[in-house]
Amino acid sequence: MLGLRLALQRTQPTAIFRHCASSQSVLVKQGWGLLSQQHVRGMANTKDDGQFKTWKPLAPTLRQRRMTSRKHLHKGGPVRELTIAKRRSGGRNNTGRITCRHRGGGAKRRIRLVDFRRTEPGPQQVMRLEYDPGRSAHIALIKHMETGKLSYILAPANLKPGAVVQSFMRLAKREPQNKEATGVEEQVEKKEGEDGEELGALDYTSEGLALHAGGTERVSLEVGNCMPLKMVPMGSTIHNIGLHPYGRGQIARSAGTWAQLVYTGPTGLAQIKLMSGEIRRVPVDACATLGQVSNVNHKHEKLGGAGARRRRGWRPVVRGTAMNTHDHPHGGGRGKSKGNKHPRSPWGKPAKGGKTRRKPNTMVVRSRPRR
């Protein structure tokens, strides 16, 4: 063995061409066994099939890692004017005490100012789709086709750059508006029928358009359009739903989420069915956007290792049985026993299946099914 090693050292390194599995010529130097730099630079360590991005298992953490594809997203940074700096506290309050556990560190971020109210009327064109580190869904940069104003909205699924979206929240608002504050000169007035009753019903035509109560405005029922619940056809898939009349959207904003409109009317309360199975009441003047939230495959992602969690600002989680008695109800004792106690949180609340809600929500018609 020693003689063979000495013979290799004396021999001049000659280039021998061999064929690898990818039918490409690989330059291997005899004696050193080093690949050429050009081939190493051309090796593909990732694979993106349009749905998920996977990694070649060069490390144990990359073997199970699987992220959603971002090939269709913008490769550059966000619009600087539509972002603000994110100041972190590490989960501590003004006195320095930890009030939110498992937080700290992570990469620097900037908060994207997403428009959840959608009060700007007129057609707006989708310029591009972007990644937002502050949420699981993707966001869309839209530009007003008349004023040129830029803004961010939640990107619905299957929304493409170049599409045109609109908001009909100002159209449906019946109360008088301040012209100086809003810049809208024309106001929508109430119109009455022959019998003096207000026309509150909507007429949905075969072209996917709805007539406003006044009968002079047409509402487009395209994905990404925002309108009050009283203008949405029953059975439609919606997201970014508000809880207050003409307020910002608060329900169904995460990746892949949606809700279904069960009942609506010209006045009063509408009923929506959430993904959890819960049916709840919402004012008919609350906003809603047609379609499902983008990044549907987010629930199938796998980070792979602990480092990916740390880069996202999460710190390790310690089991209660590994703590001392004064740190957790499960702590202390000898061995791994938790003292024959029911599972509970660090503050003594039931942790698995126990009821912690004191007052029922009056807006919930039917709660989600329990296990």
Image (tube, rainbow, N blue to C red):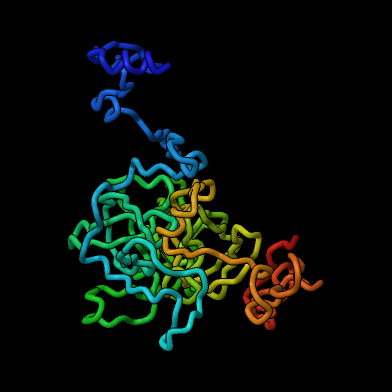
Seen as rendered, the residue at the extreme left is 147
- Residue 310, percent across and down? 44, 59
The foreground one among 147 and 349 is 349
Residue 171, given in percent of the width and then of the height, sits at 35, 68
Depth check: give the residue in front, 265 or 142.
142
**Is 244 rendered above or below residue 34?**
below
- At x 30% / y 23%, what residue is drawn? 35
Relative to 164, say whether 102 is above or below: below
Relative vertical location of residue 34 with respect to residue 74 in this rendering, above or below = above
User: Where is the C terminus found, in terms of image quarters?
Assistant: bottom right
Q: How many marks?
A: 0
Q: Position of residue 95 (x, y in %)?
A: 43, 88
Nearest the eye: 272 or 329: 329
Residue 151, position as x, y percentages in the image: 27, 62
| Residue lying furthest right | 340
Q: Residue at x 24, y 25 (%)?
A: 38
The residue closer to the viewer here, 207 or 241, is 241
> Which quadrant holds residue 149?
bottom left
Q: Residue at x 29, y 67 (%)?
A: 120
The answer to whether residue 359 is left or right of residue 251 is right
Residue 107 appears left or right of 238: left
Q: Is residue 26 visible?
A: no
Q: Is any part of residue 336 visible from this angle? A: yes
Quarter location, residue 268:
bottom right
Q: Quadrant of residue 44?
A: top left
